[in-house]
Image: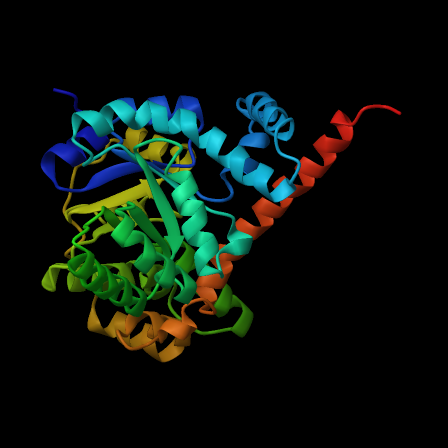
Amino acid sequence: MNQNYFHRVHGQSPTMFWINNPTRTQADWALAEGALGCTNNPSYTQKMLGHPEEGDYAKQILTEVLQVYDDDRKAAIEFQARMCKPIADKFMPLWEKSGGVHGWVSIQGDPFADDIAQEIVDQAIDNRKVAPNICCKIPLTEPGLEAIGQLIPLNVPINSTEIFGVAQMVALAEAYEKVARESGKFPMMYMSHIAGIYDDYLRNYVAENDVQISPDVLHQAGLAVARKVYRIMTERAYKCTFIGGGARGLHHFTEMVGGRVVVTINWVGTADKLIAQNPPVVYRLFNPVPDKVIDELMEKLPDFKRGYLEDGLSIEEFEEFGPVQLFKSAFTKSWAMVLDIIKEQRQVMAPVV
C-alpha cells in the first residue's frame, strides 16, 4: 500500500488533491503522488515561457502558433490551448478509468474578455475541443453567471472560479439547480473558493489602513469563509463540488481535509513540502471557528463581512468585489505579458527586407 501523504488523504478521507499550473514533469509527479485533477489559469502560459525547464518548449509552441494566427489575441488563446493539451492528455487515462469522475483539467479564457458573457461562452466551447476531459473555468461575476446559464444546457463541464463570498456560491448553486432542472442537463460543476487570495487581499487592507487585529485572527479569515461555504453547500445538498484554491500555505490544504472537497495546490512550495513532511491525515474542515474570531473579523474588516454574510454581496457587485479584482489583476497582467511576447516574437520572425 502506498503510504505517501496524498494517497493516504484520498484513502482515509473524501478529500482530493489536484495540481495547479504544472509543468509536464510536475503533472507526471503529481499523478504518481495521487493527484486526481488539474487546474490552470490565465497566468499559465506566461509562467511556462519563463520556466527554466519548459521555456524552450513553450517558445517552440508559440512559434508554431504564430505561423498560423495573424491576430495576437487569437494566437494567445490558441497558445494556451496547445500548452494545456499535453497536460490534459496525461490526465486522460484517469478520466477514462473513473468514468469522468476524476481526471479533469481546467482552462480559463482570455481575462480581458471575461466581462462579456458571449465571449466567455464562445471561448468555453472552443476550449472543450482541446480534450474530452477539459473543464471550463469561468469567473463567478454577473457576466460569468449569465454565461454559465447558457453553457449548462450544452452539457459543458464547468469550474466556476474567482469565488470569495458566500453570496457568490449561493448564486451559482441556485442557478445550476434551476437551469439543470429546466434543461435536463447536469454537467460537472465545480465551485472554486479562493481562500488564499482572500487572505492576501485582507492582509493588504490591514497593512494599508493600519487595522489593529491579531495576526492569528487574520490568519483564519479566508478559511472561515471557506468553512461556511462548504457547510451551506452540504446542508442544502447543492450539486456542486467544492474546490479550495489559491493556497498560500500548507494550512490551505491541511485545514480542508475531511470534507468531500478538492484542494488544488502548486507543486513547488506546497505539494512538494507536504510530500516531504508526510503529516498524519487529520480531519480539520469541520473544526468550528470561534465566535470571537468571527466577531473581530466582522467588526474590523468590511470586505470579510461582505464575503461572510449570505446577503453581503449582490450579483451586480461580484465583479467589483476587492478580492475578485485582486485575483483578476494577476491574470490580466500575465496575459498582457504574453501579448507583449507575441509582438516581440513576430518581429523576430518577420522577414528581413
Q: Residue at x 45, y 62 (%)?
A: 324
Q: Is residue 203 in view? A: no
> Residue 220, percent across and down?
31, 61
Give the residue at the far right of this rendering: 353
Residue 346: image quadrant is: top right
Q: Residue at x 41, y 39 (%)?
A: 127
**Split into 4 quadrants, where in the image is the N terminus?**
top left
Observer-nearest of 115 and 344: 115
Observer-nearest of 51 and 120: 120
Q: How is the image coloured?
A: rainbow
Vertically, is 274 above or below 328?
Answer: above
Observer-nearest of 316 and 167: 316
Residue 217: image quadrant is: bottom left
> Residue 289, percent across and down?
21, 64
**Split into 4 quadrants, where in the image is the C terminus?**
top right
Q: Residue at x 39, y 27 (%)?
A: 87
Observer-nearest of 69 and 284: 69
Q: Is residue 237 in view? A: yes
Residue 349: image quadrant is: top right
Q: Is residue 167 left or right of residue 291?
A: right
> Residue 250, percent across and down?
33, 43
> Residue 345, percent across and down?
71, 31
Vertically, is 173 above or below 126?
Answer: below
Give the tally of numbered discs.
Answer: 0
Q: Residue at x 12, y 40 (%)?
A: 13
Vertically, is 214 above or below 278?
Answer: below
